[in-house]
Image (spheres, rainbow, N blue to C red):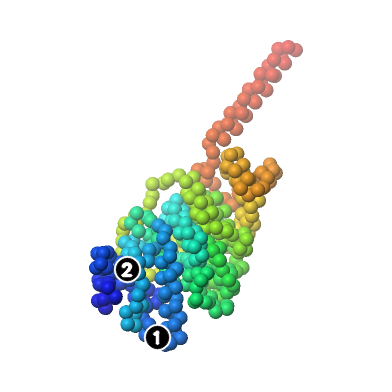
Amino acid sequence: MISQLGRYEVLSELGQGAMGVVYKAKDPLIDRIVAIKTINLGLALDEKEEYEGRFYQEAKAAGRLSHPNIVTIYDVGRNDEVAYIAMEFLEGRELRDIMNDEGLLPVHQILDIVAQVASGLAYAHENGIVHRDVKPSNIMVVRDGHVKITDFGIARMASSSVRTQTGMVLGSPKYMSPEQVMGKLIDQRSDIFSLGVMLYEMLTGQAPFTGDNVNAIMYQTLNTIPSPPNTLNGSVPEMVNFIVAKALSKGLDDRYQDAKDFADDLRSCRDMLPRSGLKVDFSKLGGERKLPDAFDITARMDANEEAARTTSQMVLSQAFDSAAATMRLAALTSNDTDVDELSKTLQMERPSAEAIKQAGLKAKALQPVKHKSWVDPSAQTASGGFLLLMILLLVLIGAISIFVL
């Protein structure tokens, strides 16, 4: 193990990265512990130029970003045949390891984690950077549950001199967007799709698009609509189905256009959930085990494939794919003030009673398992009280009629 990189004193090896070794080191100038990501440049000339270009691109991409949910870059340099990036040292665990070790997390905690990632991505997108490789192994969760996005190694900047060849696919197949699979130009909506895949996997314990090989996975990404999350995990509320459906829409215009909107919806849904008291303690560090990106769980609901396929086609294709659908759902779940505000924002009229009724039928079809926590008890009480009043009134009228006659 090397002992020095530039001015940094190497303390230990943290692990193997995608393009080199990651070290724990000390910056003697300010007595700060850092993580140093390296790349060995002792390669063939064509490989050396590509890898070095991508390596410095990561430094530029992440180095210009300052956000609580993005890892901080301190320095970049070169030492003989080793290029390196010095970055914030994070005392935590990869989200992938947490998912492998803990299984399904509580739903409110999942929504909180993904909302933090969405916030970090929104900031990157505002600064012209698309991550292009959003997945659990590129997300770090530190002791207090705070989330950091790492590895901007294949990020695309508007001013980048490192160009992807036409038709060349970069990223992890299970998390790629349809446009990424086809080798098309991508924007921030591709990151949103990838984050939607990650959200689906966290909620259900399985990736929405799987296969025996890369081609099978890509085919599913382009052509298959996955089953709603709550058919695999009964604790997932129906509103989360709508959020996942919108994030995983194959059409760019049907997807969330802004990661901030995605984060806002996740937080709103999280705040509506009852707290079970169950929460994974992220202070348990360690766990160097690296497993494949997709994994199975035993706690999934029993459902035959045909039923799941029918439900998925009914739910995720057109249930939540337009501004009009958004308005109908808002009318179903929000108060009049919020609906009026959304109507002004979208510059659309409030939906008719018939449209709301149809949206209610769609939402009802989404949820084979009823969740009482999503029902307003006051509405039930008011409805029951009105019915009782009507019955008493009818009885009174009948008694008066008999007396008069």
Question: Can you name the residue that lies furthest to the top here?
Answer: 404
Q: Which mark is residue 304?
A: none
Q: Please rate how many residues cluster around mark 1, counting C-alpha atoms within 10 Å: few if below 14, some from 14 to 19, many from 20.
A: few
Residue 219's image quarter?
bottom right
Please tell me which residue is depicted at 64% across the width and 52% down the height of the picture.
323
Q: Amino acid at mark 2?
A: Ala
Q: Which residue is mark 2?
A: 35
11 left or right of 150? left
The answer to whether residue 128 is visible is: yes
Estimate the x, y position of residue 146 in percent, counting from the top left.
Answer: 38, 56
Estimate the x, y position of residue 64 in percent, counting from the top left.
Answer: 43, 65
> Looking at the image, is mark 1 or mark 2 earlier in the sequence?
2
268 left or right of 77? right
Q: Which residue is mark 1?
A: 43
Front-most of 282 and 259? Answer: 259
Please tell me which residue is depicted at 60% across the width and 39% down the height of the picture.
336
213 left or right of 78? right
Marks 1 and 2 sit apart, C-alpha to C-alpha, by 24 Å
Quadrant containing the C terminus in the rendered view: top right
Mark 2, secondary structure of its residue: strand
Q: Amino acid at mark 1?
A: Leu
The answer to whether residue 361 is visible is: no
Mark 1, secondary structure of its residue: loop
Residue 28's image quarter?
bottom left
Total number of numbered labels?
2
Q: From what the image shows, is residue 58 above or below residue 379? A: below
Estimate the x, y position of residue 32 in percent, counting from the top left.
Answer: 27, 64
Please tell me which residue is depicted at 30% across the width and 66% down the height of the picture.
34
